Every structure is written in C-alpha cells, then in structure tokens.
Amino acid sequence: MENPTPFACRTEIGQNFLVDPKVVRDLVAAAAPDPDTVVLEVGPGKGILTEALLGSPCRKVFSLEIDRRLEPFLEPLFARYAPKGTLLWGDALRVTFQDLLPEIPHLVAANLPYHITTPLIWKFLEELTPRGTRTLVLMVQREAAWRLMAQEGSRDRTPLGITLQRMGTLRKVRAVSPGAFRPIPQVASTILEIRIQREPDLANDPSWRAFVRGSFAQRRKTLVNNWIAGWRLPREEAEGRLAPLALPRTARPEELTLPQWIRLAQEHDWRREGGPAPEGRSAERER
Ligand SMILES: C[S@@+](CC[C@H](N)C(=O)[O-])C[C@H]1O[C@@H](n2cnc3c(N)ncnc32)[C@H](O)[C@@H]1O
C-alpha cells in the first residue's frame, strides 16, 4: 500500500501536536472530569488529548477545530466513542459558544493554539464562565503562564492575569518541554489550571475592563499618567485616586497588589463616559 502524504503542520496556527502520553495523562488528571462533567476542547488536532478526554469518566466532550484537513484523524475517533463526543468545525475566536454548544461546559481542557491564547481566554471569561464554566486546564506557552500568574512587582503583570487572579486561583500543573510535541516548537510550555471561584461575570464589566486596559495602556508611564491620558482626568483628580492607597505618585501599574486593584475598581466608575479616550498608537495590545 502506498504511504499517505504526511500531514503538513501549519505551525503558524499552533499545529504542534502532543506526542507524549504522560503529558496528556497529567493534563487530564488535573482536569479531573467526573461523570457529570461536560468538557470543551479547543483545537483537537490529531486527537491525542481528545481521545484521553473521551476515555475519561466525563459525560460529554465537545471539540472545536478550525482545520478541516484533520477530519481523517478525528472522524474515526469520534465515531468510536459515539455518542459521547461531538466534533465541531469553526474558528474558536469567531463562534459564539452559547449558540454553538447545546450545553455549557463545566470544564475547558485544551492544548491551546498559542497565537490566540490571550483573546481566547478573554472569550472564555466573557461567554463561558458567566454561564457556569468553572475550570480551565490549558497548555500554554511558558511565558504566557508567567504573565497570567505574575504577582505585584513583576513586569509580566497583565490585565488578563489580574482579572483571572481576581476571579479565582491559578496553579502551574507542570512544565512541558518542547520535545513533547511534533513538530518540536521553539518554545517551552506549561500546563495551567484555573479555577473560577468568584465574580464569574467580571470580564463583562465594562468599568473593570476599561480600568485594567487603560491603566496598562503604556507600561512605561506611571498609573497617574495613564489615567490622565486615558480618562482625561485632571492631574489632581488622578493623584487623588491613588492617595488613599499610600502609593507614591510615581507608582506604575505593575506595582499594585490585587486588593489595591479591587479597591480602585470599586471606588470609581472607570467607564469612559466623557467620550472615547485616545487608544493611541502606542497603546499596548490588551493582554
Ligand atoms: C497545539 S495544537 C493542539 C492539538 C491537539 N489537541 C494536541 O494536543 O496535539 C492546536 C490546535 O488548534 C487548532 N486551531 C488553531 N487555531 C484555531 C482556532 N482559531 N479555532 C479552533 N482551533 C484552532 C489547530 O489547528 C491545532 O489543531
């Protein structure tokens, strides 16, 4: 029999497939699905993680893949486990999860396409956690994990990391070396477990979103200067917002502790009611 043409991986859309079964086992063990659990997997690829999820005690697995060329790998797998799994085709950033999924998943378990890690996690927080998703177990690039878990004082601190920390707990499950994937990527990876325990609708709070995004708009600027630029606040007013926190006027966004972020968010309305603020060309992409 002729050899089939090998699958040409598109690494620009994150097609580095897991090949280490121990890593797959560790990811599923961290997710710990029980017989009631409905799981969403984004990017099943050739199906190594999908198969472990389908073989776990969970009730249902929905897998959403963008690349139809993977059909020959995935169709037979889903047929084997029918009706436990449902294979869906589409772009995870463009679908509306509520319309796509007949049930809201309790758990998202995925080896993410790394190029869309940040917008995809925001989307989970906007569309899924408000409706009941409580656990995310995600393979991400190591540096993305650092940014999500970064504490005050770290230059890696980001709006998304602070949002997740306000909503629950983040735990590093394990480090994963490039050799666990084919093709071998140039970056190291981390499995991260995120448990949502508070404020599941936080990402849909326009004041919170504007506040964290605008405060980090220009990292090299002080908080006060970001507030002046973003909200057109008079300097006195901006400095007045910082004063009760006993922080210097020169404090930068990464210096705030989580309780300080929460206090500032609760004490002021950060929606930009005075008209759209300049999202200047130098404003950083929301992370
Ligand atoms: C890192 S691979 C993981 C594959 C498989 N789960 C594994 O662990 O081997 C990421 C997968 O996400 C898919 N993907 C990339 N962008 C996507 C998108 N916007 N929506 C859905 N799937 C996407 C890729 O085609 C690829 O199969």
Image: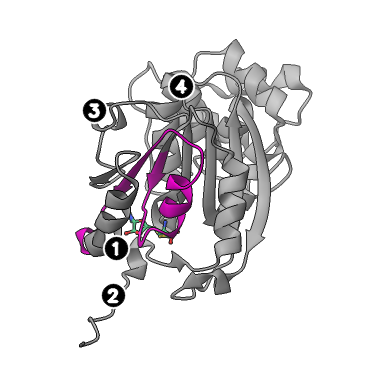
Kindly state the secondary structure of the residue where label 1 is placed: helix
Picture quadrant of residue 268 = top right
Q: Is residue 133 visible?
A: yes
Q: Residues within 10 Å of mark 1 (few under 14, many from 20)?
A: some
Which residue lies under the disc numbered 1? Answer: 73
Picture quadrant of residue 12 = bottom left
> How much space separates mark 4 and mark 3, taking CA atoms?
15 Å
Relative image position of residue 151 (x, y in whole percent): 71, 41
Decide which of 88, 14 is in the foreground and name it.
88
Kindly state the secondary structure of the residue where label 2 is placed: loop
Q: Residues within 10 Å of mark 3 (few under 14, many from 20)?
A: few
Which residue lies under the disc numbered 4? Answer: 132
> How much space separates mark 3 and mark 2, taking CA atoms?
31 Å
N-term-proximal mark, 3 vs 2: 2
> How much space separates mark 4 and mark 2, taking CA atoms?
37 Å
Which residue lies under the disc numbered 2? Answer: 7
Relative image position of residue 133 (x, y in whole percent): 47, 27
Quadrant of ligand 1 in image: bottom left
* Closer to the eye: label 3 or 1: 1
Answer yes or no: disc 1 within 8 Å of ligand 1: no
Kindly state the secondary structure of the residue where label 3 is placed: helix
Residue 202, magenta (yes or no):
no
Residue 59, magenta (yes or no):
yes
Q: Residues within 10 Å of mark 2 (few under 14, many from 20)?
A: few
Relative image position of residue 96 (x, y in whole percent): 26, 32
Which residue lies under the disc numbered 3? Answer: 99
N-term-proximal mark, 3 vs 1: 1
For badge 1, the amino acid type reads Phe
The answer to whether marks 1 and 2 mark residues whose Cβ atoms lie closer than 8 Å is yes
N-term-proximal mark, 1 vs 2: 2
